[in-house]
Amino acid sequence: MELALLGNPNTGKTSLFNHLTGSYEYVGNWNGVTVEKKIGTFKNKKAILVDLPGVYSLTPISEEEAVVTNYLLQGKMNRIVNIIDASQLKRNLLLTIQLLEYGKPVIFALNMIDIAKRKGKVIDHQLLATYLGANTIAISARKGDGCEELSRASIDQQCNGEYSLFIHYGEIIENAIEKMSVMLQGKTSLSNRWLTIQLLDGNTTIFQFLANLLSKQELETFIHQVTLECEKIAKKPEQIIYLKRREVVNQIVQKVEVEADKKQIPISEKIDYLVTNKYLGFPIFIAFMYILFMLTFDWIGTPLSDRLDYLISDLLTEGVTNLLTSLQVTSFIRSLVIDGIIAGVGGVLVFIPQIFILFFCISFLEDSGYMSRVALVMDKWLENVGLNGKAFIPMIIGFGCNVPGVMAARTIETKKERLLTILLLPLMSCSARFPVYALFIGAFFGKNGALIVLSLYVLSIVMALLLAKLFSSTILKGEKSIFLIELPPYRLPSLKVLWKSTWDKGKGFLKKAGTFIFAGSVLIWLLTYLGPGGLDVEMDQSFMALIGSVMAPVLAPLGFGTWEAGASLLTGFLAKEAIISAMNIIYAVPDTRSLQHLMGEVYTPLASYSFMVFILLYIPCLATLATIYKETGSKKWSAFSVGYALILAYILSFIIYQLGKWIGLN
């Protein structure tokens, strides 16, 4: 048995999916977190559940919403589970009506009744079930209350899809439904009524589907004739459909929703007065980010990383060295393991505490409901540069990893804004760059580390805004969309949810260490071990030195014109973490010193900041570039994302270093 889980954004749909299936999918407290359908198996193994993107209507205006209509057109599910936000009943029931018209059995999960009560609304869910003509179960998706009952009812309930709720759309629309039913007779197993209503409601996906059954000309003629009939009463078909649905919804809500004796002002409204204020909103966001970086560097992250560095660099290296010596392995293998694998992979792993603390803090801000407010605050800024607040959501995701950030751009309605967001995503300072920041901050900036990292994150946002204005005014002119976002109530995230979300983000970092970084470390070591003169050559005579020397003169005006820096930067295309692996191997840190101490002799503070800015902005990693190509389907735009970022990184690092020298910062 296959069930489809559907509902508006921010109704707790993904949390419900996790409770019903026992699996975990990323839960972010903002719109559009579910971009593609996800499939899980019920805990009792009797059915599978498909989690579809949150939508307000079946008429798609973005790629994520088209996923829902395309899935419904396949018609494979046995039943639909529709999750409804009790605190936003009027809006949610508009989708519910469309699902009932679809014709498959539906069971309703009424969520957030406690929030509705705090807003002064008491919902009679049994009376609601009577009007909808289907089983309606009150649940708490976050706590899991009612989920077992819903699970049993979803699988065992016997219903045939014939509901008491029926909307008569008026003579014009009803006649059109009858006419289309005749035209489609025997051509599809789907509900002709549902298909016709969706067609007249402007669903382009349904139009494309029906164009394969009839002819495009027949459909256009049909729609034109119905439109002419509707215009006689000064309305369009979609207006008639919407107004009739709204009338029915209002009637239902008036009967099932009772005003409570005492209405409480939601805490969300009190907090939003500050965090969404047009003057205070952005400074508050910057303050939160500063605290996040203080936790990551000064307060918790760095002390833990120092201890892990001791375990890997001293204890593990010494233990493995003694083991290999006792086994009398060759010097080649000993050098590969110690100087290649442990130095390369271990040099990245020491930053695990800082990476996980960063992800934990970001997960807290996401699941608390704050990130939606940040998108709202940023909307005015983004609107001025050719985007809207919805584009900031993929950018925030990009702070964790650029790959899911690029994929999240599917939630943006217009093609132009979606492409623009994708092109700008690689500028967001992802966690893979974090080890590089940590290295230089530990070497040069000490207690000011949080401010330095904050400046890099702010710089990435500022550059994205400036380039958005440039691109939207030149190469990407086009239509603008309207930004609509639902602000969810603030919640205190549970530790279980936070840990799962943190682990979901952080495990990618560990996977890279065991795959890309491992392979990259071996390759880098081989290039330093081999040279034109043969095996085990001096580092300066190795193939790696020859490769890096080609780039050194070009990088000299940026403050880091050495072959070591050039060779390290090349590895960043594979993965940004590989830069640290390359440095650990190339600089061949003595046993008595750390890489951070060595950086203090090789770089200056100004050169190190210039280097970090270059890392922040230059070419996307291989995985991000592949995702850009997949999402855009264009080699031209993929190459453009590499070219403009490289030029921008060079120009900005050049300005920072040369200006810094001029004012005496070197």
Image (tube, rainbow, N blue to C red):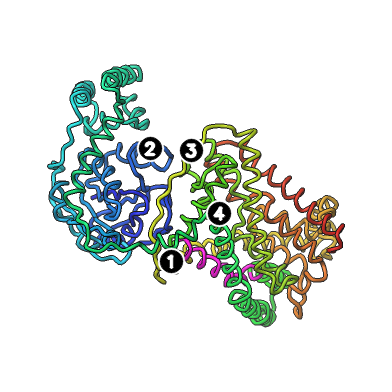
Q: Quadrant of residue 337?
A: bottom right
Q: Residue type at mark 2?
A: Pro
Between disc 2 and disc 4, whose residue precedes?
2
Residue 594 at x, y percent in the picture: 73, 75
Between disc 2 and disc 3, whose residue precedes?
2
Disc 3 designates what residue? 481
Disc 2 designates what residue? 60
The answer to whether residue 336 shows anywhere in this view is: no
The answer for how far apart the CA atoms under marks 2 and 1 are is 31 Å
Residue 59 among those drawn in magenta = no
Q: Residue type at mark 1?
A: Lys
The answer for how far apart the CA atoms under marks 4 and 1 are is 19 Å
Q: Which residues are magenta?
A: 346-366
Disc 4 designates what residue? 398
> What mark, if any, has residue 500 been given in the picture?
1
Q: How many marks?
A: 4
Residue 275 at x, y percent in the picture: 49, 60
Relative to 326, say whether 5 is above or below. Answer: above
The answer for how far apart the CA atoms under marks 3 and 1 are is 34 Å
Q: Quadrant of the C terminus?
A: bottom right
Q: Residue furthest front?
A: 262
At horizontal 64% and vertical 53% (from top left) the residue drawn is: 460
Between disc 2 and disc 1, whose residue precedes?
2
The answer to whether residue 299 shows anywhere in this view is: yes
